[in-house]
Image (tube, rainbow, N blue to C red):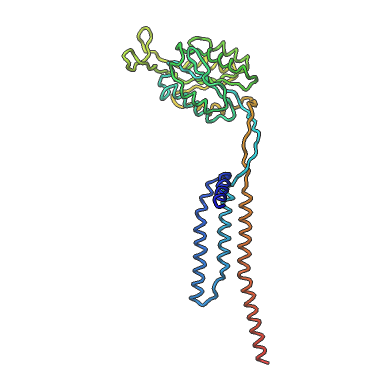
Amino acid sequence: MHLSFVKLSNEIIQMITWETPSWLLALFAAPLWAVFFAWVGIRRRRLAQVFALEAPARGRYAQGACYVLCFVFVVLALAGPRWGYHWQNVHRHGIDIFVGLDLSRSMLAEDVKPNRLERAKREVQDLLDALGADRIGIIPFSGGSFVSCPLTLDHEVARMFLDDLRVGQIEPGGTDLGSVISRAVKSFEDTRGAHRALILITDGEDLEGHGIVAALKAKEAGVKIFCVGIASQTGAPVPVLNEEGHSSFLKDRQGRTVISKLGGESLQKIALDTGGAYLQVGGGAFGLAGFYKNEINKMEKKELGGSRKKVYENRFQWPLSVALLLAVAGFIMENRVSLPRWRWRRREKGAGRKSDAAMAI
């Protein structure tokens, strides 16, 4: 029977969760309160013996116990005990967003530290933290493109795909903005409406020249393109490994070092034609999360799916009720301890007066 009781107690404890468990730390003060009340009681009794006063009633200890337990149950109520739950339907409204990330060799230039690609990936990480109920997908591109992460509500999955992106994963080299725009529009075909956006992060050098044409088709499909030009106006050389495996810079056919600069004009036109916005990045962080909040998040939102959420039942009323009863009990004890003594003294005084009167007669 004892083992059954212990097993039942463990099951009950496991059923209980706490809304703010940090309040439970205050329970360590309960023994201190108990020791304090006990010390006060002992101190009063000793003083009563020294000065020949009336000793405090032993009911004071029960009164102190009530107040200590009242404190314990108030703390339990503040911690927010929860047991039992119900299912609640949750409807998610948001935007479908594809992030097109340039993986061409020019993204290794270091005019944006540590380099253009790594800075862009860090900003996309911040974007994932800022997203609410939006779906997000990732399309890396260079001379071609592919969908590495389809649209998903699981932002941690998108983060995993983002971490794996490297320069050289896509052949041929170069930068074809038309390829990534067309790929995004095609991947949006399963959805309709004005809740679709493409964030294009690139140094803007549209070497194939297909970006403007693809942007017009995106506009017809209702997809807005938000362009982020990540490079400086002065540009920077592109690091490569030479034949001996040593670090060098990319050179043209005449042996001159190639300087990769921001091709911002084409990006501005793509964003303007599709009703999006353009963000130019200099040599530091560019705040993609802020760009999302100020520009992209204003777009029309659509219900992207529903789910069921487990909602725990709050039971703070139970310990709070017990605390209230203990406080009332302590208050009653305090008055019952002192009230009879006061009445007894009155009776003693009354009896003394009667005896004095009898002697006088």
Task: Note whether 355 is above or below 339 in the view shown.
Answer: below
- Residue at (55% x, 75% y) in the render: 54
Residue 49 showing in the rendered view: yes
For residue 305, side relative to residue 108 (left or right): right
Image quarter of residue 314: top right
Name the residue furthest top. Answer: 253
Where is residue 335? Give x, y as percent.
63, 67
Of residues 206 and 58, the one nearer the viewer is: 58
For residue 260, side relative to residue 247 (left or right): right
Task: Note whether 25 is above or below 134 in the view shown.
Answer: below
Residue 19 showing in the rendered view: no
Name the residue furthest front. Answer: 1
Q: How many marks?
A: 0
Where is residue 182? Give x, y as percent.
56, 13
Of residues 39 and 282, the one nearer the viewer is: 39
Task: Note whether 16 is above or below 193 in the view shown.
Answer: below
**Image quarter in which the C terminus is found:** bottom right
- Residue at (63% x, 72% y) in the render: 340
Where is residue 232? Give x, y as percent.
44, 20
Where is residue 32? Give x, y as percent.
49, 58
Name the residue furthest right. Answer: 361
Image quarter of residue 151: top right
Image quarter of residue 212: top right
- Residue at (45% x, 11% y) in the render: 172
Name the residue furthest bottom. Answer: 361
